Image (spheres, rainbow, N blue to C red):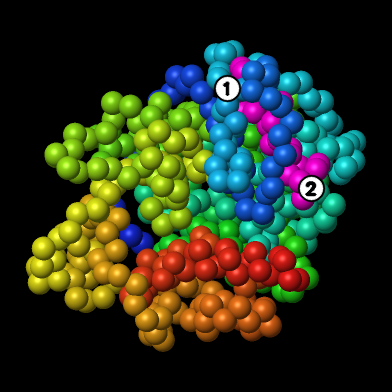
Amino acid sequence: MSKIIKLRKGLDINLQGKAAQTLVDAPLAKEYAVSPLDYDGVTPKMLVKVGAEVKAGTPLFFDKNNERVLFCSPVSGTVSAVNRGEKRKILNVTIASDGELTSEEFATLDLHKAGREEVIETLLKSGLWTMIQQRPYGIIANPTDTPKAIYVSAFDSAPLAPDFNFALRGEEKFLQKGLEVLSKLAGAPVHLSLRAKAEGEMTTLNNVELHTFEGKHPVGNVGVQIHHIDRIAKGDIVWTVNIQDVVLIGRLFATGKVDMHKVIALTGSEVSNPQYYRVVSGAPIASIVKGNVKAQKEGDTVRYISGNVLTGVNVGEEGFLTAKAHQITLIPEGDKYEMLGWAMPRFKKFSVSRSYFSWLCPKKEYKLDTNLNGGPRAFVVTGLFEQYLPMDIYPMYLFKAMIAKDIDKMENLGIYEIVEEDVALCEFVDPSKTEIQQLVRESINLMIKEC
């Protein structure tokens, strides 16, 4: 075990509604969805039409920017709709499940004998290649690249995040297989990051290089971990994979079938019984939360977030679980005006400043809504971001370079090391209410276009 890397910067946001360690098998839903919007930089081109019969692992569409990258159905059934937005932009493809979960058949490769290209081809044909993300930029990895290393974080430190030691209990065989597949792609052991004093099977995994981290959120972000293990310089390419997706990859190579089951945590203050569910990727939100939402007062509404409160997507009750989400969070919408809210004692509010009393109760769990508590203001230099981003960069100057679209300064100030999730805390504490995550994505897209 390596030495413990201790991060002193960061912030843990204690919210009500942490999932109890109880696992429920969610019944198969009538319909599932695959959305190109869950991936940055993807321009989809359809391969099937409405009414086509598909199996789990059947390609639905591909990326025009790289035709080898396929997006496949998570279940067997019939393509029920191709939902489009403005300018016929594809929003998602829905599949009516037949309840059988029949899969396409793929070769079960002997990893000791198989070549790297054979492994890549299997991942591409099954649609699981989309789970491999590239840094810099946070986009789907290019199969023609050879990464400097592959990184996997074995824990998540976001608010109400699932405990992967519990979620992956019983999946150790597939997890080990998935890590072997990734090491084949990298040509070296995978970098696996654990939380300090972690228990369970994670510490006994083979063919990995273990790293141990201690600290507050965003200590669980793989980008922060890479920064403290081996920083990304200009020209470097590294790949990252979520640990639950490693299990899906391992399952494919062990069985030769696509099985998109994963464990998600249903969390938040508006959940009656927060717990874990085993679901199929792309499941409708309503099929998971049905009967488990607290009764609301007249006029009150709930926000349904696919993901955590910092980086998740507001999908609504009629939406679907996004591809990268491993939790669903339900919190009050916060769409009501609070009369003289600034003059109230605010005992139940949370803030990083001492204008609220929350600094006296650091371990208290809060019921927070989505209210911004103020409108956008001038983007001023405060020195606040540096207290919460545990990376050796200057976030304020980097954000100002992004606003100015100064590519040279963005390169020098560390844009290659971050994606949206790494700066989510900066957005949370920002007194100017700037949409920093959106600013980062727009700047990354500019870098991809120009560089």
**Crowding at label 2, few (<14), some or many (≥20) Cα neighbours within 10 Å?**
few
The picture places residue 349, in percent across and down from the top left corner, at 20, 62
Residue at 49%, 73% in the rendered image: 390
The picture places residue 45, in percent across and down from the top left corner, at 72, 39
Q: Amino acid at mark 2?
A: Asn
Q: Which residue is mark 2?
A: 66
Secondary structure of the residue carrying tag 2 is: strand
| In the displayed structure image, the side of residue 265 where residue 411 appears, left or right | right
**Considering the image in quadrants, where does the N terminus appear?**
bottom right
Q: CA distance from mark 1 to mark 2?
A: 26 Å
**Crowding at label 1, few (<14), some or many (≥20) Cα neighbours within 10 Å?**
some
134 in magenta = no
Secondary structure of the residue carrying tag 1 is: strand
Q: Is residue 363 above or below residue 108?
A: below
Q: Nearer the viewer, residue 438 or 223?
A: 438
Residue at 64%, 34% in the rendered image: 248
**Considering the image in quadrants, where does the C terminus appear?**
bottom right
Q: Is residue 197 visible?
A: no
- By secondary structure, the bulk of the magenta-drawn segment is best described as strand
Residue at 85%, 52% in the rendered image: 144
Q: Is residue 235 above or below residue 260?
A: below
On the image, which quarter does residue 2 sit in?
A: bottom right
The picture places residue 119, in percent across and down from the top left corner, at 82, 39
Give, as a single range, the part of the protein colored magenta. 56-78
On the image, which quarter does residue 80 sit in?
A: top right
> Which disc is residue 80 wearing?
1
Q: Is residue 148 above or below residue 241?
A: below
On the image, which quarter does residue 212 sit in?
A: bottom right
| In the displayed structure image, the side of residue 17 where residue 315 appears, left or right | right
